[in-house]
Image (spheres, rainbow, N blue to C red):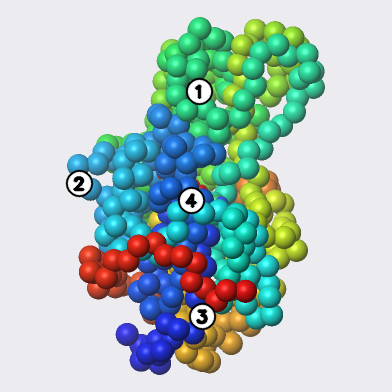
């Protein structure tokens, strides 16, 4: 360990941090703080860890058929590979079990208070006052918001909706395909969830349709027998413009011309939108189990009319139209929201308020958990430097206020809310590494968390023990 930033022996007493949420981001943050001896508590509204991967967590967008979109090989937490007997793309239940095993292995349960929703957080002097749903309040040194981005459904309205006699529900409420039996079903939106749900409808519905507003690239989950991300991982040394060109050609060979299936041709280059990894939808379109339609023009009693003038009788519309990002327990003035996304340094550090952090408020082009670990390491390195009075903390604070790097790796992401905090993994890693090196903060190393494993000091998830207000 770098002696200059070693934690002082009494620092455990000098300021407890609060993590909101025990999903993957909260767990990653917890392991990182624990490894640096920084005291913290986690509040989790649900009864166990795992975030959205627990289909029983009320409001989770998970559905029975969901599988991982990134492969297990590149999606694990650092030093905690997914089990060998897991398939390339594990099921949602396997991913949940993986998160729970992680929390157990690193003895994180003892820090978490379950069934405890955070109601509000506000600044009180130099501390943060955290109020729980039951009215309890405590002061914390700092707050890390890790409460996720898929809890507030985006529900568009369509012309003529009041006349529609069918049912409309957001995909967050969709759980399993028996819902579709005996119905003509329209899925709106072709994100990864929309495509999965359309495939479920293709199996169970009398007829399934998918309404897609623009053309997308559909990347097969395997290329030459390898998971697509593993295939692409070997090509990071290639400039992005070149890999866009090469992948464009590969996809033409593998997938062919999708306009023949009623889909639009993409109006952008590959990788300029969040990748859709799905070959099943193409299979279903080719077999007529799902029919592609364009944008919806209006709803009319039992019918949906599309922009091209065609009409279909529809019993059920599932809106796979994404989510509004929110941090509902913090007054809007604390975070600067731009295009519906919080504006943060490196997607992590609040620029205006000290000791206010967010982890998981970004989207990226690959498995998130290693990235969460590296981001958590950056946050806890900064906290550690502050606690130790290390000069690097002040240096970093200047960057928080002024540094606005472009983290797109030269890729022109589409100008939509979704892509405004979209992070290119390679570019992010490179930049984060450079900054960390400048600060003298070590990178994550294999074996770093070894000492946390299976320690014998398990205590029950405690009462609120931050300083009582
Ligand atoms: C269908 C689907 C497939 C996906 N596939 C992949 C994939 O293949 N690879 C990948 O890396 N990512 C994937 N993701 C992204 C996924 O969002 C992340 O894997 C991960 O779950 C995000 O973790 P998180 O901790 O940021 O948020 P969440 O999982 O949302 O966890 C947040 C936690 O905070 C809790 N919480 C919320 N509000 C409060 C409050 N006020 N008080 C206390 N607790 C609160 C919630 O109960 C929850 O436990 C997928 C997402 C979906 C929907």
One can see residue 48 in this view: yes
Name the spot of residue 30 as percent of width and height, x first: 41, 66
Q: Select label 4 or label 2 by which is in front.
A: 4
Q: CA–CA distance between discs 4 and 2?
A: 33 Å
In the image, the residue with mark 1 has its CB under 8 Å from the nearest atom of ligand 1: no
Q: Answer with left or right where residue 156 lies relative to residue 54.
A: right
State the residue at coordinates (43%, 75%).
39
Say whether marks 4 and 2 touch (CB < 8 Å). no
Q: CA–CA distance between discs 1 and 4?
A: 34 Å
Q: Secondary structure at mark 2?
A: loop
The numbered dot on residue 15 is 3
Q: Which quarter of the rendering shows the N terminus?
A: bottom left
Label 4 sits on residue: 115
Q: CA–CA distance between discs 2 and 3?
A: 40 Å
Q: Select label 3 or label 4 by which is in front.
A: 4
Q: Which quarter of the rendering shows the C terminus?
A: bottom right
Q: Select label 2 or label 3 by which is in front.
A: 3
State the residue at coordinates (58%, 87%).
394
Q: Select label 1 or label 4 by which is in front.
A: 4
Label 2 sits on residue: 84
Label 1 sits on residue: 198
Q: Answer with left or right where residue 219 lies relative to residue 109.
A: right
The numbered dot on residue 269 is none
Above or below 247: residue 259: above
The first of marks 1 and 2 along the sequence is 2
Name the spot of residue 309 as percent of width and height, x first: 74, 12
Q: Is residue 128 or residue 3 the one in the foreground?
A: 128
């Amino acid at each position: 360990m770098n002696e200059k930033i070693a934690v002082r022996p009494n620092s455990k007493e000098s300021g407890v941090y609060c993590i909101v949420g025990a999903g993957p981001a909260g767990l990653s943050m917890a392991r990182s703080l624990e490894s640096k001896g920084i005291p913290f508590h986690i509040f989790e509204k649900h009864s166990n860890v795992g975030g959205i991967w627990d289909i029983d967590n009320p409001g989770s967008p998970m559905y029975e058929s969901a599988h991982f979109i990134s492969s297990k090989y590149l999606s694990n937490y650092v030093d905690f590979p997914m089990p060998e007997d897991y398939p390339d793309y594990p099921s949602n239940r396997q991913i949940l079990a993986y998160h729970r095993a992680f929390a157990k292995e690193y003895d994180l349960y003892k820090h978490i208070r379950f069934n405890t929703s955070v109601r509000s957080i506000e600044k009180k002097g130099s501390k943060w006052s955290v109020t729980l749903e039951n009215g309890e309040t405590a002061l914390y040194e700092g707050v890390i918001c890790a409460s996720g981005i898929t809890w507030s459904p985006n529900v568009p309205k369509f012309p003529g909706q009041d006349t529609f006699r069918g049912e409309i529900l957001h995909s967050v409420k969709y759980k399993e395909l028996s819902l579709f039996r005996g119905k003509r079903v329209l899925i709106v939106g072709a994100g990864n969830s929309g495509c999965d749900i359309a495939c479920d409808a293709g199996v169970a519905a009398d007829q399934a349709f998918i309404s897609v507003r623009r053309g997308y690239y559909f990347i097969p989950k395997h290329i030459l027998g390898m998971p697509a991300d593993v295939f692409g991982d070997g090509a990071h040394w290639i400039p992005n413009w070149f890999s866009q060109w090469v992948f464009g050609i590969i996809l033409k060979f593998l997938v062919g011309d999708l306009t023949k299936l009623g889909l639009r041709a993409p109006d952008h280059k590959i990788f300029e939108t969040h990748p859709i990894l799905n070959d099943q939808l193409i299979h279903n379109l080719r077999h007529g189990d799902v029919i592609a339609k364009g944008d919806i023009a209006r709803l009319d009693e039992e019918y949906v009319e599309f922009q091209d003038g065609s009409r279909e009788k529809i019993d059920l519309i599932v809106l796979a139209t994404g989510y509004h990002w929110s941090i509902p327990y913090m007054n809007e003035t604390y975070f600067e929201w731009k295009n519906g996304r919080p504006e943060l340094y490196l997607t992590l550090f609040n620029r205006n308020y000290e000791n206010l952090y967010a982890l998981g408020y970004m989207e990226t082009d690959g498995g998130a958990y290693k990235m969460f670990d590296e981001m958590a390491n950056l946050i806890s390195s900064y906290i550690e430097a502050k606690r130790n009075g290390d000069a690097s903390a002040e240096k970093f604070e200047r960057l928080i206020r002024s540094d606005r790097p472009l983290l797109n790796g030269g890729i022109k992401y589409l100008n939509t809310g979704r892509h405004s905090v979209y992070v290119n993994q390679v570019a992010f890693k490179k930049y984060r590494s450079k900054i960390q090196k400048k600060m003298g903060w070590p990178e994550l190393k294999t074996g770093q968390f070894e000492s946390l494993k299976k320690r014998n000091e398990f205590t029950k998830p405690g009462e609120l023990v931050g300083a009582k207000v």
